[in-house]
Amino acid sequence: MGGRLVSKLLQGKGSVVVLTMPGQANLEERLHGYQAAFEPQSGIKISHVVDIQGKPQVAFDASAAILDKEPKKVDAFVCLEAIAGKEVAEVVNRVKMSDKIIVAMDADPGTLEWVQKPFTWRSPACGCSTICIIIRSADWAPIGPRTRPGLTG
């Protein structure tokens, strides 16, 4: 579902950075799901797969370095591990790159706090916010108009 959402938001073309922890079975499954969703979209490429090593600071530093080096070559960030979402949101906010899409997994409190902040960002593809939460609980309710929740697994 997340891969289809990113494909739709990118309108079939763009570059995606994935933040994950290789070797963790559930995250490997998520990555394979995104790869499968992007496969029919020849215009969408995963440009970087970042091993965050279970450390929020690694997610922050890697995102900042990628945007510093090649800001125009990144269209979306997919955070397969919950702790990366808030770090990427902080980086994107600091550098004021409102055109970036961020998809974060699970209902991490720090990521949900970013959804509640008064963003003015809008995705040109569908008008939704740049932070999209993909969660695993069917009873979770959106906290505001800036969310685009979905279900995984």
Image: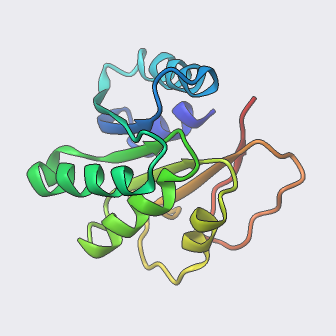
Residue 126 in sight: no
Q: Residue at x 59, y 67 (%)?
A: 110
- The residue most toward the bottom is 118
Q: Residue at x 39, y 46 (%)?
A: 77
Residue 41's place in the image compared with 91, above or below, is above
Q: Check the picture and name the quadrant holding the N terminus.
A: top right
Residue 23 in sight: yes
Q: Residue at x 61, y 77 (%)?
A: 116
- The residue most toward the right is 139
Q: Is residue 63 left or right of residue 1?
A: left
Across and down, in percent, residue 13 comes to: 31, 34
Indicate the quadrant where residue 35 lies.
top left
Q: Check the picture and name the quadrant holding the C terminus.
A: top right
For the rendered model, the colour scheme is rainbow
Q: Residue at x 56, y 21 (%)?
A: 33
Residue 32's place in the image compared with 133, above or below, is above
- The residue most toward the left is 69
Across and down, in percent, residue 76 comes to: 36, 46
Q: Is residue 133 left or right of residue 22?
A: right
Q: Is residue 21 left or right of residue 95?
A: right
* Count of numbered labels shown in the rendering: 0
Across and down, in percent, residue 102 comes to: 45, 53
Across and down, in percent, residue 37 comes to: 50, 22
Indicate the quadrant where residue 143 lies.
bottom right
